[in-house]
Image: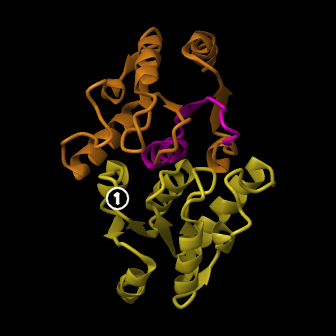
Chain colours: A orange, B yellow
Amino acid sequence: MKIYFAGAIRGGRDDAALYLEIVTLLRAHGEVLTEHVAGAELIASGESNDDRWIHDRDLAWLREADCLVAEVTTPSLGVGFEIAKATEWNKRVLCLFRPRGGRALSALVAGSDRVTVREYHSAADLREIFDEFFATR
Amino acid sequence: MKIYFAGAIRGGRDDAALYLEIVTLLRAHGEVLTEHVAGAELIASGESNDDRWIHDRDLAWLREADCLVAEVTTPSLGVGFEIAKATEWNKRVLCLFRPRGGRALSALVAGSDRVTVREYHSAADLREIFDEFFATR
């Protein structure tokens, strides 16, 4: 099982520590292709690589992946972009959303029948969510 | 020329007044299918319609459109989603970005060879950007 994990980078790194917990939990279910997204050293200015190079690498990883797991609480152009590509390419998609401040999830994500949205409150809730998602193929 | 305009809704309405100026300028170049995105009455909780209904309506409009014009300064899952779909469906894409606070645009958007990114500072810069984009087909 190859897993593409998506989280905000240039959209904001508020949840970076949580992304690391998510990646650690996901490793029990397969190979995480995008572990760098959880890197504590990765700040909001993003990687130093050329944008075109990053784009091509990330989309190659997404094509290779069996599924996309996205943390969607921090609004992010890149994460929305990856979710849409995954739905076009018939990948399974799991979106993890922490409701807070009355903010609602994008209707394009929440309203897609190719996307499973699971609300949660902390990393402690995720083990069960992942067990359930990866048990059904 | 049918134009799909994309701007943040649930990601945040900080730029709502600017979206209205953009839509007004775009009307000189074609029919704007998504004028509601610029609506002053549209707040960050989004439309009251069902998410699935919004998803299906928006993607039907995007399929019908000749091009996508997206304001990408406010990070937004929905706008990233729309840009990715447009690149998959071979639509022309123009992204408008106001650099501020050192924030960089997502590499997935900036690094796509199907996307034209134009930086600007205020609505006064947009007329020339639109004239140029719509003059080339």
Q: Considering the image in quadrants, where does the C terminus of chain A appear? A: top right
Question: In the rendered view of the protein, which quadrant contains the N terminus of chain A?
Answer: top left
Is residue A50 located in the magenta-colored stretch of the structure?
Answer: no
Residue named by callout 1: B100
- What x and y, as percent, mark residue B62? 59, 66
Secondary-structure class at tag 1: loop
A123 is higher (above) or lower (below) than B113: above
Location of residue B117 by image quarter? bottom left
- Please state the horizontal and vertical placement of residue A55, each as a whole percent of the image: 30, 47
**Quarter where residue A126 is shown:** top right
Viewer-proximal residue among B40 and B105 = B40
x 66%, y 74%: residue: B35
Residue B72 or residue B41, whichever sits in front: B41
How many numbered discs, if any?
A: 1
Q: Nearer the viewer, residue A42 or B92?
A: A42
Q: Is residue A2 visible?
A: no
- Highlighted magenta segment, given as a residue range: A77-104
The residue located at (26%, 27%) in the rendering is A41
Quadrant position of residue A101: top right
